[in-house]
Amino acid sequence: MTEWSAVDEYIESRLVPPDPVLDHALAANAAAGLPAYDVAPNQGKLLYLFARMIGARRVLEIGTLGGYSTIWLARALPEGGKVVTLEANAVHARVAQSNIDHAGLTHAVDLRIGPALESLPALTAQAPFDLIFIDADKPNNPSYLEWALKLSRPGTVIIGDNVVRAGEVVNAASADPNVQGVRRFFDMIAHEPRLTATALQTVGVKGWDGFAIAVVDA
């Protein structure tokens, strides 16, 4: 773990310069008692690069937490672009909105409070989204994927975070609903003819985990 963290710190020192706005967001999240589930800085920049690579204008984020990844995604958008981000916890949402406002991105982010499965049906008028980032409660990942497909178009990129679960994803007998939610998520991707996908393990300051990435073909 120490070596993983050291490598992350090396990468960040070379490729992810210090950012007072993002540092402020992390500090505000910690001060408010939010769980430290934010993506690592190098992972946040990876999301930013994904959005830039595909020229995303409309991004959907399922799971805002304190808005750290939201800020990364919003910064990647061109003028007039929009991130719609969904957060079930009202306390988390208030912290996130403050962080988004502090980042000067209020105009680029539409933060909606409430369970994502209640908010998603209202987004059909804003679809299709160019990039969809799923980073919320894992037991509902299969339902989130169903909605991601409904709100996508050919070429939409769908990213699922925390899909390795410290290796427990391979444990079919796991009693952890998070693990079982991720396993069903993988099964759905594997059997969905509209998706071409892969997944990568990651190690670093956030431990051993990984993400899945898929492109909607048709």
Image (cartoon, rainbow, N blue to C red):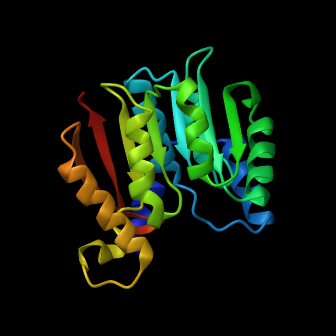
Q: Is residue 112 left or right of residue 43?
A: right
For residue 88, which quarter of the picture?
Answer: bottom right
Is residue 63 shown to the viewer in this render? no
Q: Is residue 113 above or below residue 207?
A: above
Query: Whole-percent x and y of residue 116?
Result: 59, 51
Residue that sits furthest to the top in the current view? 79
Residue at the spot 41% in from the left edge and 64% down from the top edge: 204
Residue at the spot 48% in from the left edge and 57% down from the top edge: 9
Q: Is residue 114 above or below residue 30?
A: above
Q: Is residue 217 left or right of residue 6?
A: left
Q: Is residue 104 above or below residue 148?
A: above
For residue 84, which quarter of the picture?
Answer: top right
Say which of 13 and 36 sits in front. 36
Residue at the spot 54% in from the left edge and 42% down from the top edge: 61
Residue at the spot 23% in from the left edge and 74% down from the top edge: 170
Query: Whole-percent x and y of residue 76?
Result: 53, 27
How many marks the image carries: the answer is 0
Query: Whole-percent x and y of residue 145?
Result: 39, 48
Q: Which quadrant is home to the N terminus?
A: bottom left
Q: Which quadrant is home to the C terminus?
A: top left
Q: Is residue 194 above or below residue 146?
A: above
Is residue 144 shown to the viewer in this render? yes
Query: Whole-percent x and y of residue 185?
Result: 33, 58
